[in-house]
Image (spheres, helix red, strand yellow):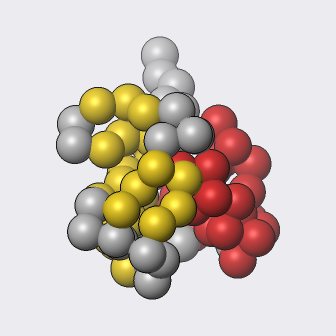
Amino acid sequence: MRIRLYGRLGDVIGREIELAAAEATVGDVRRSLAASHAAAAATLGRSRAIIAGCFVADDRTVGDAESIEFLPPVSGG
């Protein structure tokens, strides 16, 4: 599956990565990335997951041919 990361997540992990998984939940992907990239773990925990342009919950299954995006929280003035 293809994973796209934005903001700080993209800076720490990379903007786009491939993850070899036949099937996983969004939560599984989130935990796998957090375990591999401790510096991004807190931001991953607060990020929204998007599949096919829709926000999804951590229990959503992601197929190998799908793309998932993680959008971290944004602040501004």
Q: Is residue 25 left or right of residue 32?
A: left
Q: Measured along the vertical axis of the image, is residue 57 above or below residue 71?
A: above
> From the viewer's perspective, is residue 26 above or below residue 5?
above
**Relative vertical location of residue 48 with respect to residue 17 in this rendering, above or below:** above
Quick one: 74 or 54, which is closer to the camera? 54
Q: Residue at x 37, y 51 (%)?
A: 69
Residue 51 horizontal side relative to residue 29, left or right: left
Using the rendered view, name the quadrant where residue 47 is placed. top right
**Can residue 62 be seen?**
yes
Res 6 seen here: no
Query: In terms of depth relative to the viewer, which is nearer, 51 or 22?
Result: 22
- Residue 14 lies, in percent from the top left, at 44, 73
Residue drawn at x 38%, y 79% is 18
State the residue at coordinates (45%, 83%).
20
Q: Position of residue 10 (x, y in %)?
A: 45, 63
Where residue 49 sits in the image (x, y, percent)?
Answer: 45, 41
Quarter that holds the N terminus: bottom left
Residue located farthest toward the top when viewing the structure as drawn:
77
Up/down of 77 relative to 11, above or below: above
Splitting the image into 4 quarters, where does residue 68 fall? bottom left
Q: Residue at x 36, y 41 (%)?
A: 50
What is the number of callouts on the image?
0
